[in-house]
């Protein structure tokens, strides 16, 4: 990949991202995507394509919804798991939409247009990294909505500033509102009661509270994203039941605490049993190879 010289590098965030995409996808080794691996092998645009060619094809075929969804699921998955090159690739693939949003939001804007660019890009990258759920339809549309909302918020904020001289004349209270509840404290209490297993505490916090993408977390645990989704779903059910019974917000009775502890021990034994049943198979294979 050949990058522009430092003196030629664009100052606009979107222009800089576009320049990086051009360098990444140019000769002699352009980044490509095999559409046959995207789940739509009979699509008109099937086969190995460079990303600029694929972007142009998708722009010419706006109603190729199934292929677009499959391509973007693959791009998002690679951006989350395969390194920065695919992050740049995803941004470059969305560049026509991002530039269109920037043009619309900068119309009549008195501030620096680069600030709008930066907010749009930040919103897109945040959604790309963590927010978009790959099990839902239209992941590209979700990315674009996040980019637009980020830029639009900046436009709204530009008209909401109040000068220091006038701040004392504003009606109503100016004390910041205190957020209700502390979910992290409830999660810690759930671990202490055995509702949530200690090994699942951080993945649960990352996915449910921090809204991180599930694919890298599952990969770090050595399980599939679907397996982690099912595990977190079961945890959601247990936590909802505990909240309904007042176990997380009140005092658990000795009987309830003992029951929860027994259930936690059963889950741990079941998980250990599953791991054990897979080991003899591996040992046998190792012995046969020896």
Image (cartoon, helix red, strand yellow):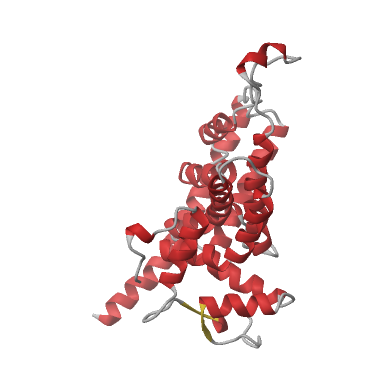
Question: In the shown orientation, is residue 280 left or right of residue 60?
Answer: left
Question: In the shown orientation, is residue 5 left or right of residue 147?
Answer: left
Residue 133 position by quadrant: bottom right
Between 234 and 252, the one nearer to me in the picture: 234
Between 178 and 50, the one nearer to me in the picture: 50
Q: Residue at x 65, y 55 (%)?
A: 103
Task: Residue 19: tell me if it is visible.
Answer: yes
Q: Quadrant of the N terminus?
A: bottom left
Where residue 244 appears, as percent x and y from the top left, is: 73, 33
Residue 96's place in the image compared with 126, above or below, is below
Task: Residue 82: tell me if it is visible.
Answer: no
Where residue 105 appears, as percent x and y from the top left, is: 67, 50
Q: Quadrant of the C terminus?
A: bottom left
Residue 164 position by quadrant: top right
Residue 131's place in the image compared with 181, above or below, is below
Q: Residue at x 59, y 28 (%)?
A: 182
Between 170 and 66, the one nearer to me in the picture: 170
Where residue 153 appears, as percent x and y from the top left, is: 66, 41
């Amino acid at each position: 990949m050949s990058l522009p010289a430092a003196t030629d590098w664009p100052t606009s965030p979107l222009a800089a991202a576009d320049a990086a995409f051009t360098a990444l996808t140019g000769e002699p080794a352009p980044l490509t995507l095999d559409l046959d691996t995207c789940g739509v092998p009979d699509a008109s645009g099937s086969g190995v394509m460079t990303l600029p060619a694929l972007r142009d094809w998708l722009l010419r075929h706006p109603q190729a919804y199934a292929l677009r969804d499959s391509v973007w699921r693959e791009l998002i998955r690679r951006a989350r798991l395969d390194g920065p090159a695919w992050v740049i690739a995803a941004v470059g693939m969305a560049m026509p939409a991002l530039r269109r949003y920037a043009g619309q939001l900068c119309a009549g804007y008195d501030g620096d247009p680069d600030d709008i660019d930066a907010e749009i890009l930040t919103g897109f990258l945040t959604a790309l990294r963590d927010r978009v759920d790959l099990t839902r339809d239209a992941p590209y549309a979700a990315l674009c909505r996040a980019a637009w909302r980020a830029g639009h918020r900046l436009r709204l904020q530009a008209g909401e500033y109040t000068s220091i001289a006038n701040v004392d004349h504003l009606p109503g209270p100016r004390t910041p509102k205190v957020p209700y509840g502390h979910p992290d404290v409830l999660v810690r209490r759930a671990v202490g009661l055995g509702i949530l297993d200690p090994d699942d505490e951080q993945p649960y916090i990352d996915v449910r509270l921090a809204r991180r993408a599930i694919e890298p977390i599952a990969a770090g645990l050595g399980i599939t994203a679907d397996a982690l989704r099912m595990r977190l779903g079961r945890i959601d059910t247990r936590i909802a039941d505990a909240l309904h019974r007042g176990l997380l917000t009140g005092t658990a009775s000795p009987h309830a605490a003992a029951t929860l502890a027994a259930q936690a021990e059963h889950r741990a034994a079941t998980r250990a049993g599953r791991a054990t049943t897979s080991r003899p198979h591996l040992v046998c294979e190792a012995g046969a190879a020896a």
